[in-house]
Amino acid sequence: MSVPVRYAPVPVDSSLITNVEFWRRPLADRMRVFADWRKASAFVHGHEEEAIFGQTLDFYGAIRHAEVLEISRRPVEFCSGRGSTAIIDLPVDALEYFSSIIVMDDPRHARQRGIVSRKFTPRHLQGLLASVERVCTEVLDGISERGEADFVSAVSEPFPLLVICDMLGIPRSEFSTVLRCTNVILGAGDAEALGGRDDVFAAIIEAGVELTGLLTELVEDRREHPRDDLTTALVHTDVGEDWLRPEELAPFFVLLTTAGNDTTRNAISHGVHLLAQFPDQKDAWRNDLDSMTSTAVEEILRMASPVTYMRRTATRDVVLAGHEFSEGDKLVLFYGAANRDPRVFADPERLDLRRQPNPHVAFGGPGPHFCLGAHLARREMAVLFRQLLTRLPDLEPSAEPELLQSRAIPLVGGIKRLPVRFTPAPRIAVAG
């Protein structure tokens, strides 16, 4: 019988886990380091002073698939509502804007998720899901005749955000405001995203205030002037239905406009880069769109794992995978590392667009916090790549991606720019 250990050191430099320069490395380079850590231990220890909020980071990173699943399945022992799902504890003055369902435990979480889930089903979103095709065509029309572009700013950035804005009923005139604010909130201190600001925390709070103000005005308008959008559906409920209170609506909308677009943006950007690295897989997909699109999307999600991590907090002393954890210990679920665990995925560093089964955790592990928008994200990716492979089949990167220059471990692994080239193609007329 093995004796539980408080922490088993690994034979590589585990201090890299909190090193800013490590998180600015290309994805494949980071995954090679995670592979070394994963061979030695189920967890890697991180301890360092954090620059943005001035807190001490002290956490245990779960880097194997089994432990990420186990922690996700046990929300009573590994909770989301003590401080934050970020590694840092969310400051009190940020809770007004960022205290959404991802930082809640039951019964509050179950209540709010239940309300939103009733309006966020494929049936309720059918009109939106149909419009994804139209928005994608509109975005690709913007570059199709040019022959070259920055794929991020021209395609993967506007596409999912336009879908989210249309879903909520946010007018197109506010697109640039939402984009700027969400880039600040999820930019992990990237200087370009901050627009020259030095105080990262103040910039994040200001972005949260601005987004909240915009969305509060939208809610007030929809109370008086209902329309066919998700905002209307959430503020006008059937008799006897529970509803989100005003103070609960804004954090949910901030979550939706940030995580709901940034994660898909980066999955798409990484996907284009991955297809260039595995041209045989791209050719196979292009020649068999109907049967491969579903599995191809799942494989891109596995390899890209745009959500870097979520944090849980131990609510009692507990032993997991032979390691002893104390109440209050922070456990950080590194989804990208889990998604390349060779115990689960054969040849995990290879993009295999026909991979089945593919039990990746790109949308989180099983349990109450599995991503509410998974269905929409899959739909967006399927539509985008089908159109790309059909309309611009030879599109490929013309330079290496420019990565987010974070000042901390980024919640979402970002690609800022990805220059691409392709044979120009005609625009497609889009019905109004």
Image (cartoon, rainbow, N blue to C red):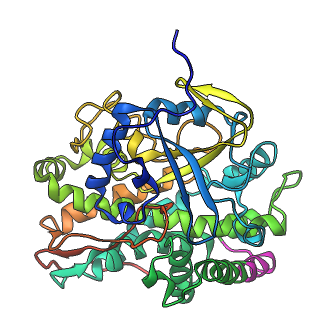
Q: What residue occupies the far top of the structure in this picture?
A: 1
> Magenta includes 221?
yes
Residue 312 relative to residue 189: left or right: right
> Magenta includes 409?
no
Residue 384 makes an appearance in the image: no
| Most frequent secondary structure within the magenta stretch | helix
The residue located at (28%, 75%) in the rendering is 151
Image quadrant of residue 320?
top right
- In the depicted view, which residue is nearer to us: 292 or 20? 20
Q: What stretch is highlighted in magenta?
A: 216-227
Residue 159 makes an appearance in the image: yes
In the rendered view, tell whether residue 99 sits above or below residue 215.
above
The residue located at (44%, 34%) in the rendering is 65
- In the depicted view, which residue is nearer to us: 137 or 246? 246
In the rendered view, tell whether residue 124 sits above or below residue 351.
below
The percent position of residue 165, horizontal first and vertical second, equals 55, 74
The residue located at (57%, 57%) in the rendering is 125
The percent position of residue 301, horizontal first and vertical second, equals 37, 49
